[in-house]
């Protein structure tokens, strides 16, 4: 017969094992969950420049460059900060930026890396896809980075981002901005779930106007996840609500949307829903409620425009592209703006009946030029236009001059009351329905005031640009494919045409508009705030001039560290609540966090509890039988 002390010993051992397992399993869960999204710090480290080494067959690389517009994936091995991932996919990416580089002497393409393209189990510290953006049309190299930083500060779900220096087969390719792809991984990390519907609007329907109750009529609102269950989406119901006085709080995260549009307006990002192109944003539907996700900010801070002309003097540059989308770079020249204490009336710069004639070149580009022969594009007087460049091209320096013009009055004084570009507010129903509501508009204005006083200040921006300059300058100097010069980069750091100066003047304008001291009368057109629409067939190409070959020994041995007050740490905006809708990770839904006990750990612990109870029952029954 088993003695009582033996029984008690068995019970003690079982309890000890159970306690040990309960202590170990949660820690295992924490490690697993932390590793799931560890790419945020291991790949996108904002305190240093990440190294990205690409190994690819030379013939594949050359084919990818020669046929860049095909955007065909090629097999490669990628090493990021010493972590090697083999058999991944890489391709060129972009739209106008891609076409523009194709039609230039440059081969500095933006790239997309897909770690799980050939093997869905592969990732880089949990990261499945990453974009390497070439900083096209941004001589400051900081527009997109700072825009994402401001979105983060205001509590928006924002892709991870940091600077990266790229080599291909050992050859330097230069400084890029790495940006996390908005995909299932991003959704799980930011929303705690990726089972909803992710949309990327770009084309027909991307203005979010109600067309019909047939989801197939919105061919430009592209579904990126959960495609097999599209019939369960509330997209059409949401569109009906925002266009036809429905209950919008049932379908959209109102507070988050207001924060998004406040930031977009403050930084004058018009290559967006608020401009003619109505793109560069994502919508994520989770349990019938839609959130907005920011995307693509190389044209922020008034970068969509500038005092730039084609060879014939046209200030508007358009190119028709896929998905019924038209690219334009409307002028933001201040020369024809009338500014006074009470009112700024932005006038059109070129009357609709005074635009240059159009020609088509062999590549399908439409070039507006005043005195070109309609047959071959040569000047009627036999001279060359545009400083001796081939007809229909634009010098890269001209493009960068455009992107460098931060200080145009029409950008600084962009309207906060009717914050749209080239369209009417009514043509953007999502924004219109929010700003037509007095309560929502007040919250929007409060967010603008917060931005103007706390983030969009000269001091705050100077801290950021100084830190980035200290970290990036040696890389900019060494970059063999850069579009602009080191001097142009440094010009954006401080001075009269810098990002801090833009922040200073833009914040002053916002505060004056909020107080009523400055009134912007909207007059929708193709210039910043007025004028009749320009023809939609203007476009441009440009001709780039690469810098001279550099000495590889100039590459820094170790990246300088950045410690920017308010940039890496500091306040994160606490999301408010409007109409019962709460921002991401602030509602009642349990959210997956980088640390914590995951679902598998909970299940395993439950199974162990059951096993323990069965074991104890068995021991007690044996003891009672006296065996």
Image (cartoon, rainbow, N blue to C red):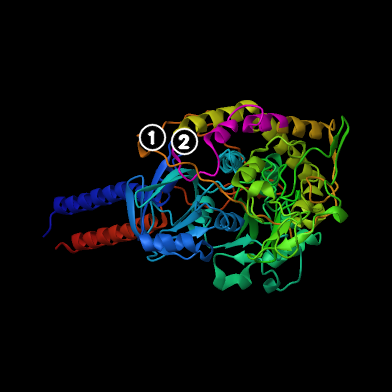
**Residue for badge 1:** 554
- Identify the residue shown where x is 82% and y is 53%: 424
Do the CB atoms of the residues marked 2 and 1 lie less than 8 Å apart? yes
In the displayed structure, 337 sits above or below 118; it is above
Residue pushed farthest left? 1
Q: Which residues are magenta?
A: 477-505
Using the image, determine if residue 421 lies above or below residue 561.
Answer: below
Residue 415 visible? The answer is yes
* Observer able to see residue 38: no
Label drawn at residue 562: none
Mark 2 sits on what residue?
Answer: 477
Is the C terminus in the top left, top right, bottom left or bottom right quadrant?
A: bottom left
Q: Position of residue 56 (x, y in %)?
A: 36, 58
Q: Secondary structure at mark 2?
A: helix
Q: Residue 371 is drawn in which quadrant?
A: bottom right
Q: Using a 10 Å C-alpha cutoff, classify the residue at mark 1 as few (fewer than 14 neighbours), some (14 to 19) or many (20 or more).
A: few
At mark 1, the secondary structure is helix
* Residue 389 rendering spot, x and y as whole percentages: 63, 50
Residue at 56% across / 70% down in the picture?
227
Residue 478 in the magenta stretch? The answer is: yes
In this view of the protein, which residue sits in the foreground, 594 or 212?
212
- Viewport quadrant of the N terminus: bottom left
Q: Is residue 328 above or below residue 502?
A: below
Q: How many marks?
A: 2
Q: Earlier in the sequence, mark 2 or mark 1?
A: 2
Magenta stretch: includes residue 218: no
Q: CA distance from mark 2 to mark 1?
A: 8 Å
Residue 103: image location, x then y, percent? 58, 57
């Amino acid at each position: 017969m088993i003695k009582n002390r033996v029984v008690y010993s068995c019970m003690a051992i079982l309890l000890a094992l159970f306690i040990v397992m309960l202590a170990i399993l949660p820690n295992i869960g924490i490690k697993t969950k932390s590793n799931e999204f560890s790419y945020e710090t291991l790949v996108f480290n904002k305190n240093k420049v990440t190294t990205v080494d690409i190994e690819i067959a030379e013939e594949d690389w050359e084919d990818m460059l020669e046929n860049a517009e095909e955007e065909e994936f090629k097999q490669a091995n990628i090493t990021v900060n010493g972590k090697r991932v083999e058999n991944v996919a890489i391709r060129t990416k972009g739209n106008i930026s891609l076409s523009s580089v194709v039609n230039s002497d440059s081969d500095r393409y933006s790239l997309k890396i897909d770690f799980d393209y050939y093997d869905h189990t592969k990732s880089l510290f949990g990261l499945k896809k990453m974009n390497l953006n070439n900083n096209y049309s941004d001589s400051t190299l900081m527009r997109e980075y700072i825009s994402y930083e401001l979105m983060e500060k205001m509590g928006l779900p924002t892709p991870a981002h940091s600077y990266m220096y790229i080599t291909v087969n050992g050859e330097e390719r230069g400084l890029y901005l790495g940006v996390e792809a908005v995909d299932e991984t991003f959704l799980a990390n930011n929303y705690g779930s990726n089972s909803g519907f992710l949309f990327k609007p770009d084309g027909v329907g991307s203005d979010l106007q109600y067309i019909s109750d047939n989801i197939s009529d919105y061919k430009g609102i592209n579904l990126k996840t959960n495609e097999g269950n599209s019939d369960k989406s509330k997209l059409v119901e949401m569109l009906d609500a925002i266009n036809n006085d429905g209950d919008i709080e049932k379908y959209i995260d109102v507070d988050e949307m207001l924060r998004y549009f406040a930031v977009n307006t403050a930084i004058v990002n018009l290559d967006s829903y608020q401009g003619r192109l109505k793109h560069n944003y994502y919508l994520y539907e989770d349990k019938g409620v839609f959130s907005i996700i920011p995307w693509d900010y190389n044209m922020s801070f008034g970068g969509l425009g500038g005092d730039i002309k084609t060879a014939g003097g046209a200030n508007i540059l358009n190119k028709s592209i896929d998905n019924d989308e038209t690219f334009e770079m409307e002028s933001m020249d201040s020369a024809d703006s009338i500014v006074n204490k009470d009112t700024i009336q932005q006038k059109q710069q070129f009357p609709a009946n005074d635009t240059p004639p159009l020609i088509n070149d062999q590549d399908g580009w439409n070039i507006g030029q005043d005195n070109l022969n309609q047959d071959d594009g040569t000047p009627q007087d036999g001279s060359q236009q545009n400083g001796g460049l081939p007809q229909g091209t634009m010098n890269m320096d001209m493009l960068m001059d455009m992107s460098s013009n931060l200080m145009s009055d029409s950008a600084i004084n962009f309207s906060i009351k009717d914050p749209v570009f080239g369209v009417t507010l009514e043509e953007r129903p999502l924004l219109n329905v929010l700003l037509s509501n007095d309560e929502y508009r007040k919250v929007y204005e409060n967010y603008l005031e917060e931005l103007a006083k706390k983030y969009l200040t000269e001091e705050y921006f100077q801290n950021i640009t100084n830190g980035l300059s200290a970290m990036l300058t040696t890389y900019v100097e060494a970059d063999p494919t850069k579009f602009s010069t080191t001097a142009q980069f440094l010009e954006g750091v401080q001075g009269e045409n810098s990002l801090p100066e833009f922040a200073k003047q833009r914040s002053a304008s916002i505060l004056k508009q909020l107080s009523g001291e400055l009134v912007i009368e909207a007059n929708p057109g193709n210039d910043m705030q007025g004028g009749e629409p320009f023809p939609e067939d203007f476009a441009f190409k440009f001709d780039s001039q690469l810098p001279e070959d550099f000495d590889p020994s100039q590459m820094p041995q170790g990246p300088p560290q950045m410690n920017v007050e308010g940039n890496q740490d500091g306040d994160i905006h606490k999301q408010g609540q409007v109409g019962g809708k709460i921002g991401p990770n602030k509602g009642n839904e349990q959210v997956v966090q980088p640390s914590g006990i995951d679902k598998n750990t909970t299940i395993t612990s439950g199974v162990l509890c059951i096993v323990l109870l069965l074991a104890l029952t068995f021991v007690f029954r044996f003891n009672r039988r006296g065996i």
